[in-house]
Amino acid sequence: MPIKPPIYKLSCPLCGYSKLVEIKSDLLCSEDLQALSTTCPKCGETMQRVPLGLIEQLIIKLKP
């Protein structure tokens, strides 16, 4: 039975770009590997894992 990993947020300390990373299962596909990339698409800096904000946590809980 697949185990869904928790959703987390990556944020770029240089330009402020951020994204939520949601992996659908413990079995990785090419889309999941692309989402795991920690390089910022805007400036090329390494993004850091940051805690989810209150609004992001609420959106995740309300998402079907």
Image (cartoon, grey):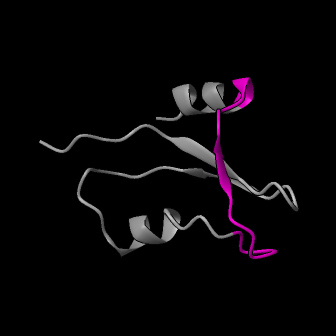
| Front position in the image: 5 or 38 | 38
Residue most extreme to the left = 1
Is 19 displayed left or right of 43 in the figure? left
User: Looking at the magenta stretch, what is its main secondary structure?
Assistant: loop
Is 19 displayed left or right of 21 in the figure? right
Write the residue at 66% across / 51% down.
Answer: 48
Is 15 displayed left or right of 23 in the figure? right
| Front position in the image: 43 or 32 | 43
Q: Position of residue 54 (x, y in %)?
A: 71, 23
Q: Quarter of the image containing the N terminus?
A: top left
Q: Position of residue 12 (x, y in %)?
A: 76, 57
Write the residue at 41% across / 64% down.
Answer: 32
Q: In this view, does 40 lie above or below 51?
A: below
| Front position in the image: 39 or 55 | 39
Q: In this view, does 5 lie above or below 59?
A: below
Q: Where is residue 27 in the image (x, y as percent from the top left)?
A: 23, 58
| Front position in the image: 26 or 58 | 26
Query: In the rendered structure, does residue 17 fall within the stretch colored magenta?
Result: no
* Label total for image: 0
**Range covered by the magenta-colored residues:** 40-55
Q: In this view, does 3 lie above or below 39?
A: above
Query: In the rendered structure, does residue 47 fall within the stretch colored magenta?
Result: yes
Write the residue at 46% across / 35% down.
Answer: 64
Write the residue at 29% across / 50% down.
Answer: 25
Q: Give the image quarter of residue 2.
A: top left
Is 29 displayed left or right of 37 in the figure? left
Q: Position of residue 4 (x, y in %)?
A: 31, 41
